[in-house]
Image (cartoon, coloured by chain):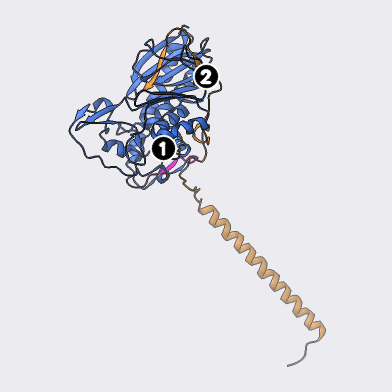
Chain colours: A orange, B blue
C-alpha cells in the first residue's frame, strides 16, 4: 500500500472530522425531534401517593394535637343556662 | 344575658342556633341550614345517595370524593392519629353488628338477643387518603363512619358560616349537645348547662359554665342506648374489642378550641377509660368526667361548681 503524503493525510483527517461532526449534529437533531413529538403527543398523568394520613388541607385536619380554648371556661355563678351540652 | 334562639332537628339530632343580636338570628339560621344540608348529602351513612355511602360501596378502588367529604375524612383520620386509634372511623360495621344499623330514630329500643362478634375493627391505617387530590381508597370490607367527628365538624363549619353571614356579634351552634362558637360572646360568656343528655332543658338544675370562646362537647354512654336480649348496648365502640365500651366513665365533657377537638377528646376519654385522666391532663383540656357510679372528676381548668372553691 502506497504511503500517504502529509497533505493527503491532513485532507483525510479533515474529511473525517466533518463526517463525525455531521453525524453527531444529526443524531442530536433526531433526539430533540423525537423527544418533542413524544412530549406533544402524550400529555402524561400526575400521580400522587395515597397515604393513611391527612397530608395537607385545612388546619383542623392536619394539626398534630388538640387545640385548647384561648380562655378557660368560668363558673356560671348565678342564673340558668341558655343551651345544654350533653350526650346525644 | 339575652340571646335569640332557633331550634329544629337535622342530621338525626337537635340543632340550636343562638345569636347575641336577635336581628341576626334568621340570617344565621339560613347559613346553618345550608351547611347541615351539605353535610348530610356528603357524610350521612344512612342516606344511600350520600357521597359517603357511594364511597363505602366502592371497595378497593381509588375514588375522588367531594371537597366536604374529603375534609370530613381528613378530620376523622386526624382524630384517629391524635388518639392513637381510640377514635377510629372504621367502627361502622361493628356498630351495625351491635344493632345500630339505621338512623337512630328507626332503631328498636328493645329487641331479641343478637350475637355480638368482637375483635379488632379494620383500623384507620387501612384507609389510603391523599387530601390534595381528594383521593381515597378503602380496602374491601372497610367502611367509614364519620358520625362522631362529622357532627362536630358540621358545628364548627356552621358557626363559621353563620358568623360570616351576620353583620356583628356572636353565634353559637349546638348539634346534639356539641357546641361551637364564633364571634363576640355575650357579656359574661355563653351560659352552658352541663348535662348527660343534650335534651335536658337549659334552665334545669345542674352545673352552668360560661364559655368565652372555643367549644364544648359531651360524649355519653347513657344516651343512644338500646337493648338486645336484655343486654344494654350503646353507640361508643372500643376499636380494640369492636364492642361497646365498658370503661369506668359514662359521660365525658371537654372544652377545646374547636368543636371537633372537644368531640375527639370527649369520645377518646370514654374509650380510654382510666387512662383518660392523664391523657386529658397532658393536653391541658378542661374536662368533666362522670363515672358509672356517679363520681365526678373535674380536670384542668374546668370551673369549680358554684359554692365550691377550686
Q: Nearer the viewer, residue A7 or B102?
A: B102
Q: Is B152 positioned to the left or the right of A57 in the image?
A: left
Using the rendered view, name the quadrant where residue B80 is placed: top left
Image x and y of residue B193, in percent: 41, 15
Q: Which residues are magenta?
A: B131-139
Q: Is B16 positioned to the left or the right of B310 in the image?
A: left
Using the rendered view, name the quadrant where residue A88 is placed: top left
Residue found 53% across the figure and 57% down from its top: A38
Using the rendered view, name the quadrant where residue B141 is placed: top left
Which dot marks residue A72?
none
Residue at far left of view:
B112
Q: Nearer the viewer, residue A4 or B157?
A: B157
Q: Nearer the viewer, residue B222 or B105?
A: B222
Image x and y of residue B146, in percent: 38, 33
Q: Is residue B150 above or below residue B77?
A: above
Residue found 66% across the figure and 70% down from its top: A23
* Mark 2 surroundings within 10 Å by alpha-carbon count, few (fewer than 14), some (14 through 19), many (20 or more): many
Image x and y of residue B228, in percent: 21, 32
Specify whether residue B310 is painted magenta: no
> In the rendered image, which residue does mark 2 sit on?
B213
Q: Nearer the viewer, residue B77 or A43?
A: B77
3D distance between C-alphas at marks 2 and 1: 27 Å
Q: Which marked residue is nearer to the observer: mark 2 or mark 1?
A: 1
Q: Secondary structure at mark 1?
A: loop
> In the rendered image, which residue does mark 1 sit on?
B86
Residue at far bottom of view:
A1
Host chain of mark 2: B
Host chain of mark 1: B
Residue at far right of view:
A6
Q: Is residue B123 above or below residue B304?
A: below
Specify whether residue B133 is painted magenta: yes
* Mark 1 surroundings within 10 Å by alpha-carbon count, few (fewer than 14), some (14 through 19), many (20 or more): many
Amino acid at each position: 500500500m502506497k504511503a500517504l503524503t502529509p497533505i493527503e493525510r491532513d485532507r483525510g483527517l479533515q474529511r473525517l472530522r466533518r463526517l463525525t461532526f455531521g453525524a453527531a449534529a444529526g443524531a442530536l437533531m433526531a433526539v430533540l425531534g423525537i423527544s418533542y413529538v413524544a412530549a406533544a403527543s402524550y400529555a402524561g398523568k400526575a400521580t400522587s401517593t395515597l397515604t393513611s394520613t391527612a397530608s395537607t388541607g385545612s388546619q383542623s385536619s392536619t394539626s398534630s394535637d388538640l387545640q385548647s380554648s384561648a380562655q378557660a371556661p368560668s363558673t356560671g355563678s348565678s342564673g340558668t343556662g341558655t343551651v345544654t351540652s350533653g350526650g346525644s | 344575658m339575652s340571646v335569640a334562639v332557633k331550634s329544629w332537628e337535622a342530621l338525626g339530632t337537635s340543632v340550636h342556633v343562638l345569636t347575641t343580636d336577635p336581628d341576626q338570628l334568621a340570617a344565621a339560621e339560613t347559613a346553618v341550614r345550608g351547611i347541615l344540608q351539605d353535610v348530610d348529602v356528603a357524610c350521612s351513612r344512612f342516606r344511600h345517595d350520600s357521597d359517603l355511602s357511594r364511597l363505602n360501596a366502592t371497595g378497593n378502588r381509588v375514588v375522588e370524593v367531594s371537597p366536604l367529604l374529603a375534609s370530613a375524612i381528613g378530620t376523622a383520620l386526624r382524630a384517629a392519629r391524635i388518639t392513637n386509634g381510640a377514635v377510629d372511623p372504621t367502627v361502622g360495621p361493628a356498630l351495625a353488628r351491635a344493632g345500630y344499623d339505621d338512623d337512630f330514630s328507626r332503631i328498636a329500643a328493645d329487641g331479641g338477643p343478637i350475637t355480638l362478634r368482637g375483635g379488632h375493627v379494620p383500623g384507620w391505617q387501612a384507609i389510603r387518603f391523599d387530601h390534595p387530590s381528594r383521593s381515597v381508597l378503602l380496602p374491601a370490607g372497610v367502611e367509614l363512619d364519620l358520625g362522631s367527628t362529622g357532627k362536630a365538624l358540621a358545628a364548627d363549619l356552621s358557626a363559621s358560616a353563620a358568623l360570616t353571614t351576620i353583620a356583628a356579634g356572636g353565634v353559637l351552634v349546638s348539634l346534639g349537645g356539641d357546641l361551637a362558637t364564633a364571634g363576640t360572646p355575650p357579656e359574661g360568656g355563653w351560659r352552658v348547662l352541663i348535662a348527660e343528655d343534650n335534651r335536658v332543658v337549659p334552665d334545669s338544675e345542674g352545673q352552668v359554665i360560661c364559655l368565652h370562646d372555643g367549644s364544648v362537647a359531651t360524649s355519653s354512654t347513657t344516651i343512644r342506648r338500646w337493648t338486645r336480649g336484655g343486654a344494654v348496648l350503646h353507640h361508643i365502640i372500643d376499636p380494640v374489642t369492636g364492642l361497646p365500651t365498658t370503661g369506668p366513665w359514662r359521660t365525658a365533657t371537654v372544652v377545646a378550641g374547636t368543636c371537633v377537638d372537644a368531640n375527639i377528646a370527649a369520645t377518646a376519654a370514654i374509650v380510654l377509660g382510666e387512662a383518660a385522666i392523664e391523657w386529658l391532663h397532658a393536653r391541658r383540656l378542661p374536662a368533666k368526667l362522670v363515672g358509672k357510679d356517679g363520681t365526678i372528676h373535674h380536670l384542668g381548668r374546668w370551673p369549680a361548681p358554684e359554692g365550691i372553691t377550686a
